[in-house]
Structures are given as structure tokens and as C-alpha cells.
Image (tube, rainbow, N blue to C red):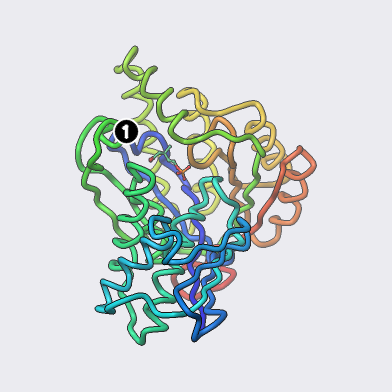
């Protein structure tokens, strides 16, 4: 028995989303985390994490995040205790790269425990359990990752309160989260700079600059908000040329906010030269990943371009339109 959940990327709106502008996030259906029941009739509940070389048991590691999440899942489905099984948690999603690997592993774990116990949890319950787990262990998750990986849908995400409560409060601001339409299939080429840049540091840097010059930064955030609203329409209409141009505009604004980097810009330039419809950094920036929008015919060429510009890793993945057209 097994269950899986996809990774995610932020298509546009990162950073400005902390200041109440909208963002769009996409699931990566071909890049998944998997939870597999490898043994039943074990003497206790065991989770193996081969990617990390870890083996945790409910008895010896009661406070481990995956054991805690397994417990809240068991409670949710009304089990008296954790089943005596061994699970393996594995992921194709690069760790700590803004691609939702932690949330996807969590969602796969929740789903496999439910399935093993003969129940099926609706996506909103999977999402809530994963969110609570991330919140407990990582502080103030935005709510984007757990939502996208649990619903496996493109989402519109917008906090409804003002001015970056996310980073200053324990309680994340309430958010509007809605599924959005992808009118036409496309490909994303994702290039990893290999430069480690934790999101809380780039978010903190933006906050300092915003505090020094709020009017300037609020104007940049508002401009990103306009780009994201137009991107939603372009996505729905399947207008990939327009969407690409909007991603380029978003990148320019992110550079003005100060979260780009020479490595990111080298990969972005290479993607554009190799025929991408648009390219930008994705997530926290400062390093981390970039993404390029391409169609089916060009994704190989763009991936080769990004690779030869020095990417530490390149992933190409299709995003399917909602109208059932695989390559629209
Ligand atoms: O790197 P990720 O995917 O966790 O994205 C960070 C997105 C930010 O807007 C920079 C921060 C946030 O919490 O929304």
C-alpha cells in the first residue's frame, strides 16, 4: 500500500505575498513524495527515511515530527494507537529548495496511514494536519505548501490582513485560498543555483528595507500584485506568451526588491536565450531556484541551456491544463 503527494513551486507573487498581495502556486504532479507500507505485523510503528538515512520509531522518537504527524493522523481517523507497520518515506523533490518537499512528505504520510486504516481523508483535512505539523516544527508557514500538495491544484493565495503579519506574529494571517484554472498545458524548467539561501533570511532582508523606505517597497509590492492578477487571467486563457512576459516583469520587480542574485540571473538569462517564454526566480530568492516557462517543443532546449549555464540541478516537468488536454 502506498500514497504520494506532489511538490510545488511559486509561479509568481513571492515576497509581495507577505505584504498582502496575491501569489500563484502550482503543484508539480511528476515530482512526488511517496509513503509506502513496507512491512505489516512489525512490533511497533516505524518510519524509515532512506533519503536522510534515518529510522524512527514511535517508542524511541515520540517527539520526531513524522511520529507526531502520524499520531495526529491516527487521532483524526479515530484509531486508539498507531498501527504496527513499517513505512518508508521517500521523495524525488529536492529538500530545502522551496519545492514543498516537507509538506509533500507529510501529506503522503497522512494519506498512507488513512488508506491503511481503511479511511480516506478529504484534501482539506490532509492540508490542515500537514499545516499544523509544519507550524509546530517550523514556526510560521505561509499555508501555501500544505494547500498545494494536498489539493494537487494550482492555487491563488492571498492573505487578508495587512503588512507582513506572517513574519512578526505566531499566528499566520488568515488567507484566501482558491483553486485556479490552467487553460492550456505547458512545461516548467526549474533550475537550482545550488546556493543555499534560507527563506527567512531573504524575507527578513526585505522587511528591513521595507521599514526604511515603505512607500517605495509598497509600490513594488503593488506592481507585483498587478502582475499576479494578470498572470491569473493569462493562465486561464492559456495565453502562454503573455504569461511568459508577465513572469519576466515579475523578475524585474524581484530584482528591484533585492532578492535576486548573479547566479539566478545567469540561469534566467540562459533560459530566455534558449527559447523560454519567460523566466524568474521562484520562492525566497537570494539563491535557490529559478523557473522558466516553455512549451512542449522547447523544454529540452531550455533545460540544456540552464544546465550549461551552471545549474546544480535541472528539472523539467509538465503542467496539465484543466480541460483534459495533455499537450494543449
Ligand atoms: O521558498 P518558498 O517556496 O517557501 O517560498 C517563500 C515565499 C515567500 O513569499 C518569500 C515567503 C512566504 O512565506 O510567503
Give the image quarter of residue 140.
top left
**Does the beta carbon of the residue at mark 1 sit less than 8 Å from ligand 1?**
yes
For label 1, the residue is 167
Task: State whether residue 287 is above or below residue 122.
Answer: above
At x 56%, y 39%, the residue is 280
**Residue 173, x across and y down, in percent:** 23, 42
Q: Nearer the viewer, residue 78 or 289?
A: 78
Question: Does residue 97 appear left or right of residue 116 in this picture?
Answer: right
Circle 1 Cα neighbour tier, 10 Å, few/some/many (<14 / 14–19 / ≥20): some
Give the image quarter of residue 177.
bottom left
Question: Does residue 120 appear left or right of residue 165 in this picture?
Answer: right
**Residue 170, x across and y down, in percent:** 25, 38
The C terminus sits in image quarter: bottom right
At x 65%, y 45%, the residue is 191
Q: Nearer the viewer, residue 230 or 303?
A: 303
At x 34%, y 55%, the residue is 133
Residue 88 appears in the figure:
yes
In what quadrant does ligand 1 lie?
Answer: top left
At x 30%, y 74%, the residue is 122
**Residue 92, x across and y down, in percent:** 61, 61
The total number of labels drawn is 1
The residue positioned farthest toward the top in the image shown: 212
Amino acid at each position: 500500500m502506498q500514497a504520494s503527494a506532489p511538490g510545488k513551486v511559486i509561479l509568481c507573487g513571492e515576497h509581495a505575498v507577505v505584504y498582502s498581495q496575491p501569489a500563484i502556486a502550482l503543484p508539480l504532479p511528476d515530482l512526488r513524495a511517496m509513503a509506502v507500507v513496507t512491512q505489516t505485523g512489525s512490533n511497533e510503528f516505524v518510519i524509515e527515511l532512506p533519503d536522510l538515512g534515518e529510522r524512527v520509531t514511535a517508542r524511541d522518537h515520540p517527539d520526531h515530527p513524522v511520529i507526531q504527524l502520524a499520531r495526529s493522523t491516527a487521532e483524526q481517523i479515530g484509531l486508539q494507537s498507531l498501527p504496527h507497520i513499517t513505512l518508508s518515506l521517500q521523495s524525488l523533490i529536492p529538500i530545502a529548495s522551496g519545492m514543498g518537499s516537507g509538506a509533500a512528505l507529510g501529506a503522503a504520510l497522512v494519506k498512507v496511514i488513512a488508506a491503511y486504516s481503511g479511511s480516506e481523508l478529504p484534501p482539506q483535512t490532509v492540508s490542515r494536519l500537514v499545516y499544523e505539523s509544519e507550524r509546530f516544527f517550523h514556526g510560521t508557514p505561509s499555508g501555501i505548501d500544505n494547500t498545494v500538495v494536498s489539493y494537487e491544484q494550482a492555487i491563488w493565495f492571498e492573505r487578508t490582513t495587512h503588512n507582513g503579519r506572517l513574519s512578526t506574529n505566531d499566528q499566520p494571517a488568515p488567507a484566501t485560498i482558491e483553486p485556479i484554472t490552467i487553460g492550456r498545458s505547458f512545461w516548467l524548467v526549474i533550475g537550482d543555483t545550488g546556493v543555499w539561501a534560507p527563506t527567512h533570511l531573504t524575507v527578513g532582508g526585505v522587511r528591513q528595507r521595507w521599514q526604511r523606505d515603505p512607500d517605495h517597497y509598497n509600490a513594488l509590492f503593488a506592481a507585483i500584485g498587478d502582475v499576479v492578477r494578470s498572470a491569473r487571467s493569462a493562465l486561464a486563457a492559456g495565453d502562454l506568451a503573455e504569461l511568459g512576459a508577465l513572469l519576466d516583469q515579475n523578475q524585474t520587480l524581484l530584482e528591484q526588491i533585492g532578492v535576486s542574485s548573479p547566479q539566478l540571473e545567469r540561469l534566467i538569462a540562459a533560459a530566455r536565450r534558449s527559447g523560454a517564454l519567460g523566466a524568474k526566480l521562484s520562492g525566497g530568492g537570494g539563491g535557490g531556484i529559478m523557473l522558466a516557462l516553455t512549451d512542449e517543443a522547447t523544454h529540452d532546449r531550455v533545460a540544456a541551456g540552464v544546465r550549461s549555464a551552471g545549474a546544480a540541478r535541472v528539472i523539467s516537468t509538465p503542467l496539465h491544463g484543466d480541460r483534459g488536454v495533455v499537450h494543449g
